[in-house]
């Protein structure tokens, strides 16, 4: 997740899916695993008097992943954003699994990579099948694992991405739910409940 992409129609689909699942499954907590990568500095404004940096208040207003707390308040859900920089995959998902295990009760864990799932070797914009398997294993029964998937530049991307999610080790592949919307046709949300 990058700051500049926060708050677009894809986020409307993401959070509509999460709130729907939370209400349907009577889950009160969401752990948003942002897979956060800080953005590059914003280019200054070019004015007649020289370059001027965009005001911090403006950037925080439009590009603050933590602003999801307004939605948490409005829906009555407890939303925790794990926003540590995503640099070391093994350590990062070790910390995520520790957070999941430390939660009491059922929770929705939302994996929010920039692009989505890559079965094998993923870059910093991907979550891998191995990452998914680690987090799913850490969930308590009744918890849900949800993952964002952006369209790939290839035919059949929906099926390939679903298989990468569903075929993660230990995943009950037949129970994977896919959510999509006409709002943004290039996004899928995958969900599975641990029983």
Image: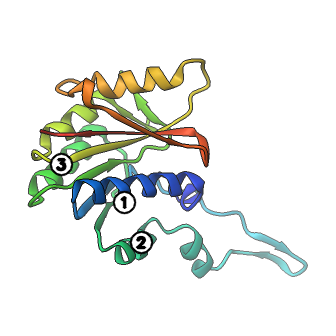
Q: Quick check: 75 left or right of 114?
A: left
Q: For numbered disc 3, what is the local secondary structure?
A: loop
Mark 3–mark 2 Cα distance, whole angstroms, equals 21 Å
List the residue tagged with mark 1.
19
Give the mark nearer the N terminus: 2 vs 1: 1
Residue 163 sits above or below residue 131 on the image: above
Mark 1–mark 3 Cα distance, whole angstroms, equals 14 Å
Q: Position of residue 62 (x, y in %)?
A: 59, 70
Q: Give the crowd class for mark 3: few <14, some 14-19, many >=20 residues within 10 Å.
A: many
The residue at the point 24 percent across, 43 percent down is 93
Q: Position of residue 179 (x, y in %)?
A: 44, 41
Q: Give the crowd class for mark 1: few <14, some 14-19, many >=20 residues within 10 Å.
A: many
Q: Nearer the viewer, mark 2 or mark 1?
A: 1
* Dot 1 and dot 3 residues touching (CB under 8 Å): no
The residue at the point 45 percent across, 52 percent down is 14
Residue 81 sits above or below residue 159 on the image: below
Res. 31 in view: no
Image quadrant in which you'd find residue 89 = top left
Q: Position of residue 100 (x, y in %)?
A: 16, 52
List the residue tagged with mark 3.
143
Mark 2–mark 1 Cα distance, whole angstroms, equals 9 Å
Q: Position of residue 69 (x, y in %)?
A: 38, 73
The residue at the point 19 percent across, 44 percent down is 94
List the residue tagged with mark 2.
71
* Dot 2 and dot 1 residues touching (CB under 8 Å): yes
The residue at the point 50 percent across, 38 percent down is 115
Q: Quick check: 119 left or right of 60?
A: left
Identify which residue, 134 or 36, lies in the foreground. Answer: 134
Identify which residue, 49 or 97, lies in the foreground. Answer: 97
Image quadrant in which you'd find residue 65 = bottom left
């Amino acid at each position: 997740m990058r700051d500049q992409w926060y708050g677009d129609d894809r986020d409307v689909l993401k959070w509509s899916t999460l709130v729907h699942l939370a209400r349907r499954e009577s889950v009160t907590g969401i752990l948003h695993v942002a897979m956060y990568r800080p953005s590059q500095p914003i280019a200054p404004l070019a004015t007649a008097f020289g370059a001027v940096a965009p005001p911090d208040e403006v950037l925080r207003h439009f590009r603050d992943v933590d602003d999801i707390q307004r939605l948490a308040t409005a829906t009555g859900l407890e939303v925790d954003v794990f926003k540590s920089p995503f640099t070391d995959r093994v350590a990062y998902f070790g910390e995520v699994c520790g957070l999941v295990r430390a939660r009491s009760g059922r929770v929705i864990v939302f994996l929010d990579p920039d692009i989505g799932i890559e079965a094998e070797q993923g870059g910093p914009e991907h979550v891998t099948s191995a990452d998914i398997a680690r987090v799913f294993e850490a969930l308590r029964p009744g918890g849900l694992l949800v993952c964002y998937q952006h369209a790939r530049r290839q035919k059949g991307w929906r099926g390939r991405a679903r298989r990468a999610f569903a075929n993660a080790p230990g995943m009950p592949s037949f129970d994977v739910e896919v959510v999509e919307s006409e709002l943004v046709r290039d996004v899928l949300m995958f969900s599975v409940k641990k029983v």
